């Protein structure tokens, strides 16, 4: 596959679009685009495109040809990332990166720092933990589909107000990357870190550091994950470094930290289900696993009442045992919350969390029955009542 050319166009007042025309080996041409604030002089190198296209080329086993200048450190990092994915046997291939136009390095670093921002727990943690990241990059087109314009409008207006309250600047980017063939890549396990980094590198003329709010609660069990403490820094160039922030801290640790910041609490938005269950929008559904996990942590930190974007009416201890905990084997999130509940003498909450852990372990054991006649009903019935 080859990046044939890029084009920049004015889309509306204050918004420009850069489009990369990508030809696959079967001749089909995809147009990958990113819209960004027109006051930024966007990157004209191949760096953002190398990063964006790497998981796709690796997934469909096509060498990646880029004639625009690229950074040597990034090419080296991209080759290491491929070996990382390959070792985890995620169905990717080690392809050749044919990018011979190596850019001469400008030794002067850009002046600013940025972090990605979504108004979730990880993003707010990084916002307060790394206040020198004066720019907050908000993305439309990842969890929230670009077809949901109205929802994004509300979401982005609220987040713009939050960033202003923080005394910082927002950079809003829309992209259709997940509407292209690129969607064949494995978003969670492989490609979402590359998608983030490609957007970061569009602004490589401005940012010497870009912080990626991490969701990695413990280093010892990260597995293969699209945004990973090993691979994220490998997307760095000679002038722009990607730095994970918050690795090794679980949700309860971060929520306790955020309990001191009212702006974070009143704007906390974590849900990717949305009010109709079809995808992220401007509210927390307050009934999915992620919402419940966050509400338990907020409850334990004593600040759930301040979080107005959650519907407390839906938060009941009697529902907690029905939470399905996917990675329950070595769970770094729920065990610490159960222990904290015990420490606070909240035995009802602790018991409810431990029930959820036991039930999830049982459900995982019963999963093989799903393929058996008659017996399939046992896990099916249990799953029907579960909170996912
Ligand atoms: Zn939710």
Image (spheres, helix red, strand yellow):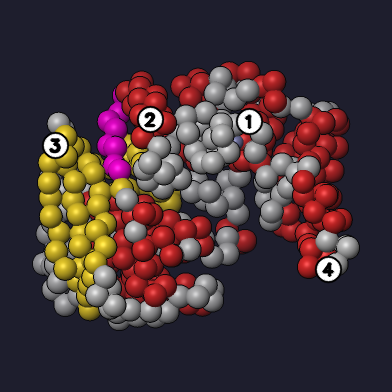
Answer with the quadrant where ligand 1 appears in the image: top right
Q: CA distance from mark 1 to mark 2?
A: 21 Å
From the top left corner, tell me how far across and down residue 198 is, in percent. 30, 56
Q: Nearer the viewer, mark 4 or mark 1?
A: 4
Q: Secondary structure at mark 1?
A: loop
Query: The C terminus appears in which quarter of the rendering?
Result: top right
Labels 2 and 4: the sequence-earlier one? 2
Q: Secondary structure at mark 3?
A: loop
Q: Secondary structure at mark 2?
A: helix
How many neighbours does mark 1 have within 10 angstroms: few (below 14), some (14-19), or many (20 or more)? many
Mark 1 lies within 8 Å of ligand 1 (Cβ measured):
yes
> Of 372 and 353, which appears nearest the observer?
372
Principal secondary structure, stretch drawn in magenta = strand
Kindly identify which residue carries mark 3.
39
Q: Nearer the viewer, residue 299 or 273?
A: 273
Q: Nearer the viewer, residue 156 or 132?
A: 156
Residue bearing the label numbered 1: 286
Residue 172 painted magenta? yes
Secondary element at image label 4: loop
User: From the viewer's perspective, is the residue at label 3 or at label 4 nearer?
Assistant: 4
Return the x and y of residue 100 as percentages of the image width and height.
16, 77
Mark toward the start of the polypeptide (1 vs 2): 2
At 54% from the left edge and 41% from the top edge, which residue is drawn? 278
The CA distance from mark 2 to mark 4 is 45 Å
Q: Measuring 36% from the left and 43% from the top, which residue is drawn there?
A: 146
Please state if 275 lies on the left or on the right of 150 as rendered. right
> Which disc, if any, is residue 150?
2
**Residue 85 seen in the current view:** yes
Give the distance between the C-alpha atoms of the residues marked 3 and 4, in whole angstroms: 60 Å
Q: Which residues are magenta?
A: 166-174
Label annotation for residue 372: 4
């Amino acid at each position: 596959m080859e990046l044939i050319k890029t084009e920049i166009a004015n889309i509306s007042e204050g918004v420009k679009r850069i489009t990369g025309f990508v030809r696959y080996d079967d001749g089909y041409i995809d147009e990958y685009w990113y819209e960004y604030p027109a006051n930024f002089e966007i990157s004209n190198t191949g760096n953002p495109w190398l990063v964006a296209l790497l998981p796709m080329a690796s997934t469909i086993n096509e060498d990646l040809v880029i004639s625009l200048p690229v950074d040597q450190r990034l090419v080296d990092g991209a080759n290491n990332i491929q070996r990382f994915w390959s070792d985890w046997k995620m169905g990717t291939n080690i392809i050749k990166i044919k990018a011979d136009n190596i850019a001469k390095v400008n030794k002067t670093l850009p002046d600013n720092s940025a972090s990605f921002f979504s108004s979730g727990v990880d993003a707010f943690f990084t916002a307060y933990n790394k206040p020198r990241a004066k720019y907050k990059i908000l993305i439309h087109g990842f969890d929230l589909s670009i077809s949901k314009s109205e929802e994004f409008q509300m979401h982005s207006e609220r987040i713009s107000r939050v960033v202003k309250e923080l005394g910082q600047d927002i950079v809003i980017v829309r992209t259709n990357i997940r509407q292209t063939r690129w969607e064949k890549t494995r978003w969670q396990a492989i490609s979402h870190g590359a998608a983030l980094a490609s957007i970061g590198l569009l602004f490589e003329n401005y940012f010497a550091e870009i912080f990626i709010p991490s969701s990695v609660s413990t280093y010892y069990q990260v597995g293969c994950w699209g945004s990973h403490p090993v691979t994220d820094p490998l997307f760095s160039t000679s002038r722009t470094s990607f730095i994970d922030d918050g690795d090794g801290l679980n949700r309860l640790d971060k929520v306790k930290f955020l309990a001191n910041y009212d702006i974070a609490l009143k704007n906390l938005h974590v849900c990717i289900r949305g009010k109709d269950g079809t995808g992220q929008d401007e509210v927390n559904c307050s009934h999915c696993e992620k919402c419940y996990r966050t509400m338990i942590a907020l409850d334990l930190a004593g600040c759930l009442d301040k979080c107005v974007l959650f519907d407390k009416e839906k938060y009941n201890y009697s529902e907690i045992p029905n939470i399905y905990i996917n990675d329950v084997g070595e769970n770094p999130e729920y065990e610490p919350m159960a222990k904290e509940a015990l420490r606070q003498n909240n035995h009802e909450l602790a018991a409810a969390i431990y029930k959820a852990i036991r039930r999830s372990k049982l459900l995982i054991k019963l999963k093989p029955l799903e393929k058996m006649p008659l017996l399939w009903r046992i896990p099916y019935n249990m799953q029907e009542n579960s909170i996912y």
